[in-house]
Amino acid sequence: MRKVYSIIIIAMVLGIGYVFSFRAYTQNSMTASAYFVTSTTSKEIRDDYHSSSRGKQFSVLIVPGHEPNLGGTEYGSIKEREIVLMITDELEKILKEDKNITTYRTRDNKGWTKIFEKYFKDNYEDIVAWSNVNKKNTASLIKEGLISKVSKGDSIQHNSASSEVATRLYGINKWSNENDIDVVLHLHINDMPRKNTSVAGPYVGFAIYVPEKQYSNAKASKEIGESLKKSMEEVMGVSTMPKESAGVIEDQQLIAMGSYNTSDAASLLIEYGYIYETQYTIEASQRKFAKLVAEQTFKGLRDFLRKE
């Protein structure tokens, strides 16, 4: 896929001239995306897929939500971080059956995969510096009025990640950029704040988060998201939470989506229903449901890739 780095020249409508936005990061590899410049398109992603048989690599990175041993929602003895590993296992199997797809994952039941364990260890300081540059550039563009910050009242509020966890999430984006990944899928299970967490909440259903429309990877991500939504609706309903009722929700805050425009790849975060729903509370149904939603996730991606 074509990538655009370094200097962006933005033509201003009223003949004011040109505004230059620099995204400089002096390392061996410059991977920061740039606002106003598309980092990936649906056509490029499809072209990568269809040319894979001729030697061009099409790649999908699966990110089972949260850290190997901490984080994520829990309901009784049910842990999100364990359930999403089941879904990842099933999805990885299906993806590997397609010879045109190269698949990566960030963790398994033993912890971080070797690729990411080494990457976090060897590049931790670089990741921090790189993410700080992106944050600073984004703040400057907001201050200059070149991009708009979505107000908290207009967006769904998410739990904040600790500094160390956030750095690893940015590291996943950085690795993805450096390795020219086509699609990144973050797998999660939803929950909602409530006083008594031992009692099920009122909402059910899936939701798919995609980058906010100003991000470089937004358009392709949303198109994939709509295809996934159509496929997922065959087996479960869209979230009944009002702000998630569209099924595909744009988000500017989530690091997984490329917060501060840090992801070049089409990036999606899928919430496979709520943790207190019966498909999770009945232990015997967990693996069966994981296989089902993995199949529908692949179907949605496949339908997008095969679309003319």
Image: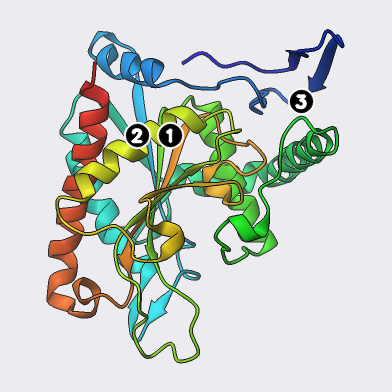
Q: Which of marks 3 and 2 is nearer the N terminus?
A: 3
| Residue 66 appearing in the image | yes
| Residue 100 appearing in the image | no
Residue occupying image coordinates x 22% and y 13%:
53
Image spot of residue 125 (x, y percent)? 74, 45
* Label 1 close to label 2 by CB (< 8 Å): yes
Residue underneath mark 1: 221
Which quadrant of the figure has residue 98? top left
Image spot of residue 246 (x, y percent)? 38, 51
State the separation of the CA atoms marked 3 and 2.
Answer: 27 Å
Residue occupying image coordinates x 54% and y 60%:
156
Residue 82 appears left or right of 300 = right
Q: What residue type is labelled 2?
A: Ile
Viewer-proximal residue, 147 or 286? 147
Viewer-proximal residue, 104 or 33? 33
Residue 269 appears left or right of 212 = left
State the SS at label 3: loop
Residue underneath mark 2: 224
Image spot of residue 145 (x, y percent)? 80, 33
Query: Nearer the viewer's eye, disc 3 or disc 1?
Result: 1
* Label 3 close to label 2 by CB (< 8 Å): no
Viewer-proximal residue, 150 or 173? 150
State the SS at label 2: helix
Residue underneath mark 3: 23
